[in-house]
Image: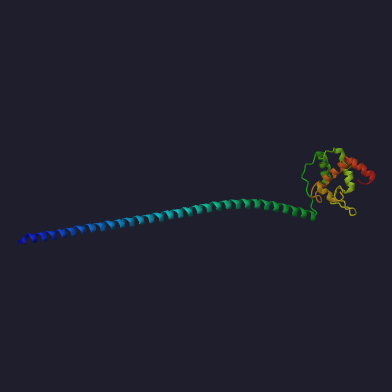
Amino acid sequence: MNRLPIRIGWRVASVGLLLAGLVSGVYLGQDRDVRQHGVSRNAGHVEVDDIQLLKERHNAHAAARAWQREAEGVAAERAAVEARTAAAKAKKIETRVIAKKKAAEEKKKAEQNGGTVEFTGPIPDSCDEYSGNREIGCALMLEAGFKIDQFPCLDKLWKHESGWNHRAENPNSGAYGIPQAYPGSKMSSVGSDWRSNPATQIKWGLGYIEGRYDTPCGAWSHFQDAGSY
């Protein structure tokens, strides 16, 4: 029996198996590489997504902080404006209160020290012959609508009543001032400075005369008959 063909057959078979094993190993290695590469690519995608998410969260937080700062800034500016407005109003009120208080104190001091409120109104030429409270009386009588021929009557009436002294006070009745108003506080209907302002007293007295006697001469006539007016 010839053994050479048998040996050659086994050798061919062995070589075939060896080649098959090599091919299988190559495929297995390639498959492993492909799987590992796929895992790496998936891992890379996951890492990129995480970074993107972190960036988006950071941007959102930054936007929220910026909005909060802007809102706080607007609120602070609005509060500052309101505070300045309130302060300005308070300052105006304070200024008025201080001015009124000062005026009241000066007025009270003037009254306590015997001060007289100065008359600053116009004096007509027809009253130039008079002076002091009589001059003021003449001017205010004309201003009230009476004729100059009425002043001699008014002059006599109040010269008899008070001597034209705006501080005159009757110790018995308490009548006060140039027209001898009783009580003197009646003259406060014309001005709160009735104690120290001759003009206030004269205006009240002229109104009283007009209401009861029509004219100063009518009041003087009644005085002569009754001893009072």
Q: Which picture quadrant has residue 221?
A: top right
Q: Position of residue 136 (x, y in %)?
A: 81, 44
Q: Is residue 199 left or right of residue 89?
A: right
Residue drawn at point x = 28 percent, y = 57 percent:
35
Residue lying at the far right in this picture: please name it. Answer: 225
Quick check: can you spot residue 166?
no
Position of residue 2 relative to residue 206, above or below, is below
Question: Front-most of 36 and 124?
Answer: 36
Q: Which picture quadrant has residue 127?
A: top right
Q: Quadrant of the C terminus?
A: top right
Position of residue 16 relative to residue 220, above or below, is below
Residue drawn at point x = 25 percent, y = 57 percent:
31
Q: Position of residue 139 (x, y in %)?
A: 81, 41
Quick check: can you spot residue 31?
yes
Question: Front-most of 143 and 3?
Answer: 3
Q: Position of residue 28 (x, y in %)?
A: 23, 58
Q: Quadrant of the N terminus?
A: bottom left
